[in-house]
Every structure is written in structure tokens, then in C-alpha cells.
Image (cartoon, rainbow, N blue to C red):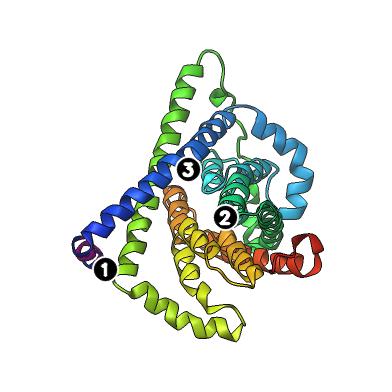
Amino acid sequence: MFCLFIFFMVLFSKSNMSSSKEGLYLWANTIVPTLLPFFIATELLSHTFVVGFLGRILNPVMNPVFNVPGEGAFALIIGIISGYPTGAKIVSKFYKDKICTKIEAERLIAFTNNSGPLFIIGTVGISMFGDTRTGILLLITHILACISVGILFRFWKINKEKNVSVLRNKFLINKLENSISFSNLGEILASSIMNSINTILLIGGFVMLFSVIISMLTRSHILPICAFFLKPILNVFKINPELSNGIITGMLELTNGLNSISHIPIKQLSQSVIIASFLTGFGGLSVLLQVYSIISKEGLSIKPYLIGKLLHGIFAAFYTYLFLNFSNFFRLDI
């Protein structure tokens, strides 16, 4: 597969260079200014008593509803606000700092790594679909789906919980020696910036790589062939077959897929929005590998995340369907 990748790199070098530039432009002009400040802020917040404070305040909610410690609320809130892959980064750090057990981290990773409101409303709703209502609808259903997955995953490995319950009491939350103060402000600030830059560079590499991969699959006619075989399946579910190419692209890389779907001129606009809702919830293979690269360092399994994101996409699409059909405000078909 890697040899084939290098062969296609040489064969389609001109189009690959163009796609690589587009991916780099997308990363530099959209992802870096959006995510880097959030990464630095969350790194700094993790060295304060905010996480511990949220844990004490929200434990009565997080524990019975999601079966995770209250500190998980920090990952959930920041994950929703800042977008992919911030939630995964926070959960990975929680497990590394022994704020949660491995099972609790796997539960958290399944529903705290989400698309942000800036991306959903601004990029998808306004820029792509040209409609603020669509962005608001996608955000509402995205959050509802996120909560639904979290409730389901409260039962993840619940039969094994007894094996780690003793260890849970030994975990130190917000270690005093790691808290920020005037004496270590410069050190922690520098460390937070460096860690954030490493993460943003990692994301940039994935964005550029998948831009090239999509270009290769298109030029080699592999993607159109896959889209051709998907069309009969879409016909069975009475979904416009013209969406097939955008669906496959979105399963690989979210932004390119959503952009493709939003520009398909079909009468049943609600179908495009429902598919967009599924893809936004799932996140695509590119985000999946970004998350895997982050959590694998701590030995966390990617399985609960993959299952969680598939369920997230399905729930989001279902809730979007309900809103489109039973709410006059969100009727979009023309």
C-alpha cells in the first residue's frame, strides 16, 4: 500500500502538489487561527484548579449520567467549544495525569471529541450551505447526539469497573506541584505553547496528507468507482445518488466531503443536511487517525472512539431528520 502511495505520488505529481497546497492553505488559514489558541488555553487551564473545581461541582451530574468523574465535564465542555481533536487531547492528558481510570478515559473519548460551533455554524452552515439556520440545526443535533452517545457509553465495560475501583481512590486530581504560580509561570507557558504547536503541526500533516490521498483516489478513478457502487444502496434508502461522491470523500476527510455535499444542486436539500449531520458527527478517517495518534501514546484503545463516532453520526442524522420533518422553523426543502 505504501509503495502504491509513492507510485501515485510520482504519477500524479502535478495534481498532488496542487492538492497539497490547498490542504496547507486550509490548515494555515482556518485550523491554526481557530484551534491553536484553544490548545494553549486548555493546556494552561489544566495547570489550574479549574478542572478540580468543575469535578466537585459537576460530579453529581457526570457520575450518574455518564459514569465518569466530574472532571470529565471539562473535556466535554472544551471539546464542544473548540472542536476536533481537543477533547481527545484533554482525555489523554487526564489519563496520563491519573485524573481518570483507563475505562473512564475510554468512555470519555467516545463522546467528548466533537466538532466546534465555529466550524459547524460558521464554516458548514454559513460558508458552505449559505444558511445560518442550517448551521444552528447541525450544532443542536450534534450536541444532542454527543449526549446520547455519552449516556450509552456509561455501560462500557461496567462489569470490569470493580477491578479498578480501588485504584480510582488513589488517583491524585490536580496535583499541587503541577499548579501554575508566579514561580513556574514562564516554564508552564512555554511548555503549553510547545505542546500545542506539536499538536497543531500533527493536524496539519494529516490535513495535507488526506488532501493528497483524495486527489490520488479521484485521479486514479478509485473514488468515482466506489461512488458508483454506493449509488444503488442510496437508491434503496431513497437518497439522491448524486451525494455518493461527497459521502465517500467525507468519510475520508470531513471538510472536503461537506464542501462537496453542500454544492450539489438537488431539490431535497434536507437530504444533504442529514448526510452532512452524519459526517460532522463521525468526523472522517482523517480525524480518527489524528485521535489515534494522540491516545495511542497513553495506551488507550481506539475501539470505543470508533464505535462512539459511528453512533454519534447515526444519532445526529436521526435527530436532524426529526427536526427537519417536525419543526416548521427548520424546513429546508425547496
Which label belongs to residue 1? 1
Name the residue beneath numbered marker 3: 30
Nearer the observer, disc 1 or disc 2?
Answer: 1
| Front-lying residue, 3 or 179 | 3
**Secondary structure beneath disc 1?**
loop
| Front-lying residue, 256 or 43 | 256
Task: Decide whether the magenta segment is chiefly helix, strand or loop.
Answer: helix
Q: Farthest residue to the top: give it.
A: 183
Q: Quadrant of the C terminus?
A: bottom right
Earlier in the chain: of badge 2 and badge 3, it is 3
- Is residue 300 within the magenta segment? no
Name the residue beneath numbered marker 2: 106
Nearer the observer, disc 3 or disc 1?
Answer: 3
Circles 3 and 1, Cβ within 8 Å, touching? The answer is no
Q: Over which residues does the magenta segment extend?
A: 5-9
Q: Quadrant of the N terminus?
A: bottom left
| Front-lying residue, 280 or 43 | 280
* Mark 1: few/some/many CA within 10 Å (<14, 14-19, 20+): few
- Is residue 6 within the magenta segment? yes
Q: Quadrant of residue 312?
A: bottom right
